[in-house]
Image (tube, rainbow, N blue to C red):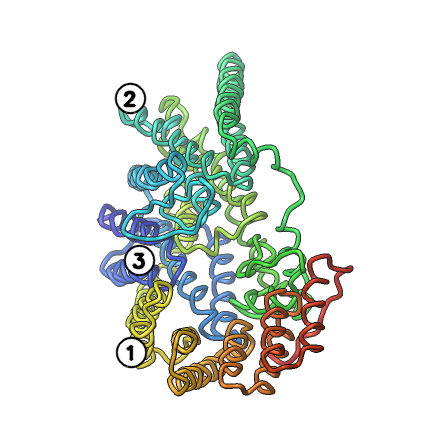
Amino acid sequence: MNGAFVFLLLASVALIDCLIGGTRLLFSLPAYGVLSAAGVLSLAFRPKTAANPACLLSTLLFSGYLLARAWFSPINYLARPDFFALLGALSVYLLTAFYIPGAKHRLLLIGGLLLLAALELFPGLLQFARGNEFMLFGFLRPAMDRRASGMFISPNHFAGFMETAGVLGLGATVWSRWPSWAKMLAGYLSLGCYVGVAISGSRGGYLSTLFSLLIFTVLSLRFIGRGERRDFRRAAVIAGLGLVLFLGCATALMTRSPLLQNRLSHLFAKEVRLYTWGAALSQFRVAPVFGTGAGTHLIYGRLFRRPQLQTDPVHAHGDYLELLAEYGLAGEALLVFFLWAHIANGLRSARRLPALLAGRGVFSNQIAVLFGALGAVAACLIHSIFDFNLHIPGNALLLAVVFGILANPEAESAGWSWPRLALPLLGAAIAILGLPALPGERFAEQARTALRDAKYERSIALAKKGMEHEKEDPWLPFYIGEANRALGSAAKNEMARFLFFDSAAEAYRDALKLFPEDEQILVGLARALNGIEEYDEAGKAYRAAAGWDPNLIAIHIFYAQGLRAAGRSAEAAEQYREARALENPPPYIEPRPPGPL
């Protein structure tokens, strides 16, 4: 029956990765549905192994706290992606630890992940070679200047997946008992993963890949060092030459691409991440113990925006800092406990396995899985400094597999087995909470894409259908507001123009009831009010938007345009001056939140 759980787990990871990594809830819910079925199915089977108590305790405390904090976060809809991703990742973790315990089935799982990586590499190579935005299944991605992102939206998240699959495959290639043809195939697929990291242009991916390869090499040499000294010296020389050759070839090939050469030359350059990190630290100071709540970096990242960063700071570009800001010191401390328990258990097994495997030959499936998992954790530890891979559900599920392996690396019978009883409860929770959300999410996505394609009447109709199913999504009325405002701007008839702008203002107000801190909704409301010449009310909306995002240049420009339309030229000139001042900003002064969240 272990094979059935391998299939279900692979199906969930493949499904979510092919749907842009699950970065929108609509595209992650199907994978969570597969995991829900696996969780319910687990009721019919009793695992023969148990997992390490410290690992399980740390996982239950960490995930339990995150789930509770997400549930009680101030903006329910913003917290929802984190909440469901946690349910899904915890399901994957428990399935891996209890129901896929043997090295044989875990290697089968790794083989499936390597095939998925090959599928991810296919569009990545086309994106890099042709400079287009090609994606499978009709998805669109923003322009990336030839940087490969595979089936993900961001090259950084593509690199996060490929570096993890690559080192897992490397373990199978070097240490497994697979036949030669299978190990050769795994080697080629692993090499393809590292090609994917290279063409992603992800500097965080480059550093984390190097660190994971270093950890894998050290573990392998220590394992060989348990044997004869002559074998160790030979292996050390081969490993050193191989690593140097690999890095040399990779660097030589990458420098042939102007894009990748530029990424390499700016590997340690000062960049925008410093501004997002600064905003996250400012957010942390608002609620240092328990954080401001799941998903709230969208609000506080704007409030504490450094003027040098004008793109929307949805995430903090660092998993550790975003966790600290949203979940506080309590979440960070539990993360440290979680990491310590799993890494310590993995290293303990790495010390024990050579003695247990004595006399069985050099190669071992258990060693292959364990060393690959430890290398994958090493990559995660470094990459999470620079990017938010663990906020991408597809990558979060993949890392849950890795930590599930480390919780039970030797398929022991000693330890705890009772936490497996959480699996059917998790499956039931996903089904009960996730299924009702699907229709609203589907209509919201259709409304968004219709608005993007300038099909405004269709966007309004779809958003209204979505509101029949979903009462907490602020973007549904926002799409109605945006579509009506666009129709009002294009209307020739004065009465029609007024009606469209009035409908837009009403929709924006509905959105603000759900998300009063959002500057996009506030600016949309102000522009709609300008359209019906309610300039005083529009000014209040602009000032509220500037209160929540004081350093966004666009707000001051829109406000100036509205003031000029109202004939208030002196005030408009002042707003233009404020916008210009932000282009060469003075030293940053931290603002106060304009109201309670």
The residue at the point 36 percent across, 54 percent down is 92
Mark 1 residue type: Lys
Mark 2 residue type: Ser
The circle drawn on residue 357 is none
Question: Nearer the viewer's eye, disc 3 or disc 2?
Answer: 3
The residue at the point 62 percent across, 50 percent down is 272
Give the residue at mark 2.
180
Q: Is residue 126 shown above or below 392?
A: above
Question: Nearer the viewer's eye, disc 1 or disc 2?
Answer: 1
Mark 3 residue type: Ala
Categorize mark 1 by other alpha carbons within 10 Å: few (<14), some (14-19), many (20+).
Answer: some
Cα distance in 3D space between marks 3 and 2: 34 Å
Categorize mark 2 by other alpha carbons within 10 Å: few (<14), some (14-19), many (20+).
Answer: few
Q: Earlier in the sequence, mark 3 or mark 2?
A: 3
Where residue 538 appears, as percent x and y from the top left, is 57, 83
Helix, strand or loop at disc 1? Answer: helix
Helix, strand or loop at disc 2? Answer: helix
Give the residue at mark 1.
465
Q: Earlier in the sequence, mark 1 or mark 2?
A: 2
Q: Is residue 166 visible to us here?
A: yes
Residue 194 is left or right of residue 306, and the answer is left
Helix, strand or loop at disc 3? Answer: helix
Give the residue at mark 3.
31
Categorize mark 3 by other alpha carbons within 10 Å: few (<14), some (14-19), many (20+).
Answer: many
Q: Earlier in the sequence, mark 3 or mark 1?
A: 3
Q: Is residue 190 shown above or below 39?
A: above
Cα distance in 3D space between marks 1 and 2: 56 Å
Q: Is residue 219 shown above or below 307?
A: above
Residue 128 is left or right of residue 556, and the answer is left
